[in-house]
Amino acid sequence: MREVIWILAMATFSTTAYAQVPVVVAPDQQILIQSDNPQLAANKMLVYDFWRIVLQTRDMKLAPQYLAEGYIQHNPNIPTGRQPFIEYFGKLERQPVKPRIDNLVAIVAEGDKVVLAFRRDLPDPKNPKQTYTTTWFDMFRIEDGKIIEHWDYGTKSAK
């Protein structure tokens, strides 16, 4: 009988040990922008403000302030170039400016690159009534104080 109890206990605890740890959104985004290196802090702030003021709101009036004219896009669903970016996102319904970026987990900067990490909640394909969390990343390259290049997880859809 002790063996059965021990086996059940081990099965219960080992299942918990292998369960996914949910992705947690950063409670204080201003801390994420800070850096001992003033250039890295400026690059983080540029990307942070671009995301919050332009992309998240879909208001393209200020896009030229943040995007270089020769902006390079690596997402296969969005055309490259600043003007095509403005036309693509400018067609979407505008949203109000928020003081924070939705679902932001972290901001990392190194050299001329800035990476934003986001929490994503997706439907569980094995259990449609539940969701799970995962992480989405966007990376930007900065040149002369503007965003010149962007990478993300974008994939082509069948639609």
Image (cartoon, rainbow, N blue to C red):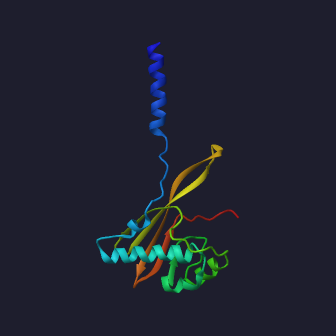
Residue 96, visible in the rendered structure:
yes
User: Relative to 78, is 137 on the left or the right?
Assistant: left
Q: Nearer the viewer, residue 43 or 152?
A: 43
Which quarter of the picture shows residue 85? Answer: bottom right
Above or below, 5 against 148 in this view is: above
Where is the C terminus found, in terms of image quarters? bottom right
Count of numbered marks: 0
Q: Residue at x 49, y 23 (%)?
A: 8
* Direction top: furthest residue: 1
Residue 67, visible in the rendered structure:
no
Q: Residue at x 43, y 63 (%)?
A: 28
* Direction right: furthest residue: 159
Which quarter of the picture shows residue 26? Answer: bottom left
Above or below, 51 against 15 in this view is: below
Q: Position of residue 13 (x, y in %)?
A: 45, 31
Q: Position of residue 144 (x, y in %)?
A: 39, 85
Q: Residue at x 39, y 70 (%)?
A: 33
Q: Position of residue 130 (x, y in %)?
A: 62, 45
Q: Nearer the viewer, residue 31 or 46?
A: 31
Q: Nearer the viewer, residue 145 or 59?
A: 59
User: Relative to 106, is 78 on the left or the right?
Assistant: right
Q: Position of residue 35 (x, y in %)?
A: 32, 70
